[in-house]
Structure formats: C-alpha cells, structure tokens
C-alpha cells in the first residue's frame, strides 16, 4: 500500500514538472526596431517603421520568431540549451523587401554574439552578402535592439 502511494505521488510530480516545462517559455525577449532614417532626423520626425514588443514563448533549441509587420521583417533567434550565453540572430525581409535584404554589419547573413551584454544593438542592412574577404557597404534599414531575460 505504501509503495503504491509513493509510486502515484512520483508519477503525479513528474507529470507536473513536464507540463510546466512544456507550457512556459525558457526565456523572454524584449525587442525594438528603429527604422528612423537620416531624412526623418533632418525633418525632426520619427519613422513609421518603429516597433517594439515582448515575446515570452521562446524555447531553447528552437527558433524564436519575431514578426515586425510595419517594416516587413522577420527576426529569427536561436539560443541553445548547451550554450545559454550565446545567441544567433537572422533577419529576413518580406514581400515588400528586395531579394537583397537583409544583412548585418559587413554583409553577414547572421549575427552570433554573447548574452553577457545586457542589450544587443544590431544594425540591419539592405544590399548584398560579403564574398570571401570583400569589403561591403550596404544601405541601413534600421537598428534592432534585443534584450534577453528570465534565462532558465
């Protein structure tokens, strides 16, 4: 009788732990995109492309996607459970963007960095990818700010 009760408590506890892990995100990403151009600054105006938000459903070992509807960009974030202090970020353009979108500094398709910094500030550019040791100067689309919290 005692063994049966212990066994049922163990099964219940295991089920509760698994359900908590499956329903909640592993980390939270706060984001902001600043699409203000030099022309906007000169005219003392803010860009209509500016967006911000929070996504709470990001999980380790899975891509976490942020849709920036105003600027027609999709941001994909990967944080691996084995290396919780490293992040890989990709940016993709939607239908309104050219095939030459989207790159990070130096014409890189992806950004890999450390989460030791409290805030990541990433420039997103339109142009072309770097080939070998080529110097690339692409056109800026805006700045993407990412802040990670509640890393479990």
Image: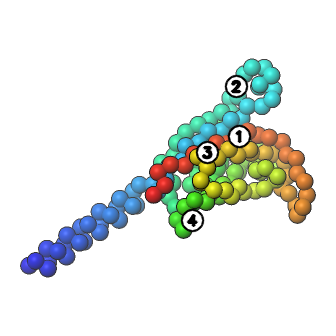
Count of numbered labels shown in the rendering:
4
Check disc 3 and report the residue beneath it: 119
Q: Tell me the crowding category of disc 1: few under 14, some 14 to 19, or many 20 or more residues within 10 angstroms, Cα based.
A: some
Q: CA distance from mark 2 to mark 4?
A: 38 Å
**Percent x, y of residue 146:** 61, 45
**Percent x, y of residue 143:** 71, 40
Q: Name the residue at 78% across, 20% down.
A: 43
Numbered disc in front, either 3 or 2: 3
Check disc 2 and report the residue beneath it: 46
Check disc 4 and report the residue beneath it: 83
Q: CA distance from mark 4 to mark 1?
A: 26 Å
Q: CA distance from mark 3 to mark 2?
A: 22 Å
Which of the 4 quarters of the picture holds residue 17?
bottom left
Q: CA distance from mark 3 to mark 4?
A: 18 Å
Sequence-wise, the earlier of marks 3 and 4 is: 4
Which of the 4 quarters of the picture holds residue 133?
bottom right
**Percent x, y of residue 114:** 63, 56
Numbered disc in front, either 2 or 4: 4
Check disc 1 and report the residue beneath it: 143
Identify the element where label 4 is drawn: helix
Sequence-wise, the earlier of marks 3 and 2 is: 2
Identify the element where label 3 is drawn: loop
Sequence-wise, the earlier of marks 2 and 1 is: 2
Q: Quadrant of the C terminus?
A: bottom left
Sequence-wise, the earlier of marks 4 and 1 is: 4
Sequence-wise, the earlier of marks 1 and 3 is: 3
């Amino acid at each position: 009788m005692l063994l049966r009760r212990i066994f049922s408590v163990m099964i219940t506890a295991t089920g509760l732990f698994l359900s908590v892990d499956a329903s909640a995100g592993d980390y939270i990403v706060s984001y902001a995109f600043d699409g203000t151009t030099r022309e906007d600054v000169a005219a003392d105006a803010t860009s209509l492309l500016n967006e911000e938000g929070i996504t709470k459903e990001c999980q380790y070992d899975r891509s976490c996607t942020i849709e920036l509807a105003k600027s027609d960009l999709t941001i994909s974030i990967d944080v691996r459970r084995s290396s919780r202090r490293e992040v890989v970020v990709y940016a993709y353009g939607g239908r309104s963007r050219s095939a030459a979108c989207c790159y990070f500094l130096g014409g890189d398709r992806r950004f890999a960095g450390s989460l030791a910094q409290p805030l990541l500030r990433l420039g997103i550019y339109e142009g072309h990818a770097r080939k070998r040791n080529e110097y690339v100067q692409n056109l800026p689309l805006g700045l993407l700010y990412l802040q990670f919290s509640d890393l479990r």
